[in-house]
Image: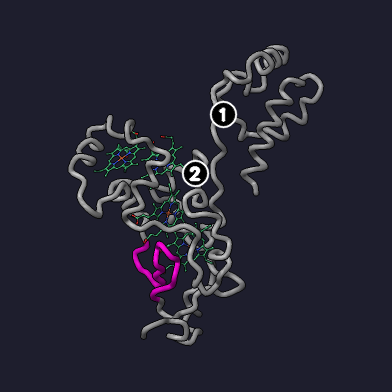
Amino acid sequence: MPRRSNVIATTLGVVLAACWLLVPLAVRTSGGEARPTASAGAKPSPTPAIAKTKADANPQQQPAPRPEPADNSYCYVCHANYEHEKLTKAHQPVGVGCEKCHGMSVKHSGDEDGLTPPDKMYAKSAVDPFCMTCHEKSKLVKRDDHKDYFRDLQEGETCSDCHAEKHHLAVRTRIWDKKTGKLVKDDGVRMMLKDSPATEGAAAKSKHGSAGEQSKGK
Ligand code: HEC
Ligand code: HEC
Ligand code: HEC
Ligand code: HEC
C-alpha cells in the first residue's frame, strides 16, 4: 500500500525533523520531494535549529499537511482514458483516487474476463449524497450555480452532470446492477487476456471467447 507507507514516511519525516542535526540523511530519504510544503518547517532549512524549534514547539498548530496524490495506476491498466478526465483530475492530486470512491476493487481488477464488478458503484440517486459526504452542502450553496441547482433539482440530475460529463463509459460491454453488483448483461466477449489486458492484443484477440456463454437471458 504505497499511499499508507507514504503517510507513515511523511509523519516519520516530521518527527525526524526534530532530530534534524542527528539524522539529516534519513529525513531527506523518507520525505523526498513529496513532502508537504504547507508547514513552515517543511523546506530543508540551512538553519536546522529553526526547523527543530518549530516542529517541536506546536506540532498541532501547523496547517494540516497536503495529502499525498493518489496512485491510480492500478486502474489505468484498463481504464487509461480516465487519467485525464475531470473528476479524476479534481481529486487525484488531493489523495482521493479511484479506490477512495470505488473501493480497492481487487477482484474486479484481477478478473481478466471482466465479470466481477468494482466494490462500489453509484446509482443516480446515490451520486449527490455521496459527493456531499465530503463536500458540505452549506458550502456548495454559496456558489450561484449550486444555489440554482439545489433549488431546481430535477429527478435524475446529479453533480456528475456538470463535474463528470466524461466520467462515463461510452460503450458498455458489461452491465452490473449498481446496488447488488449482480451482472445483468454482458456481450459474451472475453477481452481480458491474462498476459496483458491493457496493452497489445486485447482488442484484436477479444473474439476468442464463446459468445453468450455467461450472458443471461439471451
Ligand atoms: C483487468 C481490467 C480492469 C482493471 C484493472 C480495472 N477495471 Fe474497472 N472495468 C473493467 C471492465 C471490463 C469494465 C466494464 C466495462 C464495460 O462495460 O465495457 C469495468 C467497469 C468499471 C466500472 C463501472 C461500474 C459501473 O458502474 O457499471 C467502475 C466504477 C470501475 N470499472 C472501476 C475500476 C477501478 C476503481 C479500478 C482500479 C481499482 C478498475 N476498475 C480496474 C476492467 C477493469
Ligand atoms: C473522499 C472525499 C471526497 C469525495 C467523496 C468527493 N470529493 Fe470532491 N474533492 C475532495 C477534496 C479533498 C477536494 C480538494 C479540496 C476542495 O476543493 O474541496 C475536492 C475537490 C473537488 C472539486 C474541485 C476541483 C477543483 O478544481 O478545485 C470538485 C468540482 C469536486 N471535488 C467535485 C466532486 C464531486 C462531483 C463528487 C462526487 C462525484 C466529489 N467531489 C466527491 C474530496 C472528495
Ligand atoms: C449546473 C452545474 C453544476 C452542478 C449540477 C454542480 N456543480 Fe459544482 N460547480 C459548478 C461550477 C460551474 C463550478 C465552478 C467551476 C468548477 O470548479 O468546475 C463548480 C464548483 C464546484 C466545486 C469547487 C469550488 C467550490 O466552490 O467549492 C465543488 C467542490 C463542487 N462544485 C462540487 C459539486 C457537488 C458535490 C455537486 C453536487 C451536489 C455539484 N458541484 C453540482 C457547477 C455545478
Ligand atoms: C470523487 C469520487 C470518484 C473518483 C475519484 C472516481 N470515481 Fe468513478 N465514479 C464516481 C461516481 C459517483 C460515479 C457514478 C457517476 C454517475 O453515474 O453519474 C462513477 C462512475 C464510474 C464509472 C462508470 C461510468 C458509467 O458509464 O456508468 C467508471 C468506469 C468509473 N467511475 C471509473 C473510475 C476510475 C477508473 C477512476 C480513477 C481513475 C474513478 N472512477 C475515480 C466517483 C468517482
**Label 2 sits on residue:** 96
- Please tell me whether residue 69 is drawn above or below residue 20 in the rendered image: below
Nearer to us in this view, 194 or 124: 124
Q: Which residues are magenta?
A: 169-185
The residue lying at 52 percent from left, 74 percent from top is 113
**Label 1 sits on residue:** 65
Nearer to us in this view, 47 or 72: 72
The residue lying at 34 percent from left, 54 percent from top is 166
Residue 9 is situated, as x and y percent measured from the top left of the image, at 69, 36
**Distance of label 2 from label 1 (alpha carbons):** 15 Å
- Please tell me whether residue 27 is drawn above or below residue 51 in the rendered image: below
The residue lying at 57 percent from left, 26 percent from top is 37
Give amino acid for label 1.
Pro
The secondary structure making up most of the magenta span is loop
The residue lying at 37 percent from left, 55 percent from top is 167
- Please tell me whether residue 210 is drawn above or below residue 61 in the rendered image: below
Residue 31 is situated, as x and y percent measured from the top left of the image, at 67, 33
Residue 62 is situated, as x and y percent measured from the top left of the image, at 57, 20
Quadrant housing the C terminus? bottom left
